[in-house]
Amino acid sequence: MANTKFALINDVFPNFRSQHIQVKVANSPWEKQKYYQLRKKTFSQEQKILLGNEKDSQDFQAIPIIALASNWCIGEEVAGAVRIYQLPDEENTWYGGRLCVARAYRGYQNIGKALINEAVSRAKDLGCEKFLATVQPQNEKYFKSVHWHTLGSVDVAGKPHVYMQADLSQYPFMPRDK
């Protein structure tokens, strides 16, 4: 019998990405842990924007929203994250922030758009009349494509950002359990 040789190159096989994505509030302890891990990996380790502990005082009141990739028997992973919150003195104004998508899921199944839609729609359901966010300049065009407009420029953690507002009329009202 001939001696058959072959090489197995890992680059031939792309990372597994689930086709089953659910966008929801992170409720369980493991979902919240993975939510914070993804944020830290994205903002502290990859982008080096928020070095060290990227958590801030808004996290105590924020609603954490995740894109959960169900991998059937393999388990579940957090593929994306965003948070929404109100400031105590701004009754009908909500803020979104810390939007991130895991590297393997970037540009896949519109996860960023789904997270933005859930964030704005959920805030709207909770009485939001104005939804604001600070956005990295390279993402301004993307946010404009999902019905946001620019209000001005601002620095966040010493880095330039764009201050933007969502057009609430473009986001559905989706009543749900709060």
Image (spheres, grey):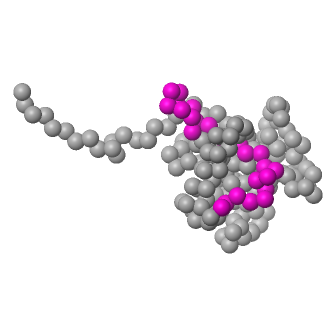
Where in the figure is residue 41, as x and y percent of width and height? 57, 55
Asked whether 62 falls inside the magenta stretch, the response is yes
Q: Residue at x 74, y 69 (%)?
A: 154
Q: Is residue 101 left or right of residue 65?
A: left
Q: Is residue 43 above or below residue 73?
A: below
Q: Is residue 81 left or right of residue 176?
A: left
Q: Residue at x 62, y 64 (%)?
A: 52
User: To which quarter of the image does residue 44 belong?
Assistant: bottom right
Q: In the image shown, does 121 or 90 lie closer to the viewer?
A: 90
Please report the bounds of the magenta region as a residue range.
53-77
Q: Residue at x 78, y 49 (%)?
A: 62
Q: In the image shown, does 39 or 162 lie closer to the viewer?
A: 39
Where in the figure is residue 141, as x and y percent of width and height? 65, 57
Q: Residue furthest bottom?
A: 158
Where in the figure is residue 51, as x and y percent of width and height? 62, 66
User: To which quarter of the image does residue 158 belong?
Assistant: bottom right
Q: Residue at x 34, y 46 (%)?
A: 11
User: To which quarter of the image does residue 160 belong?
Assistant: bottom right
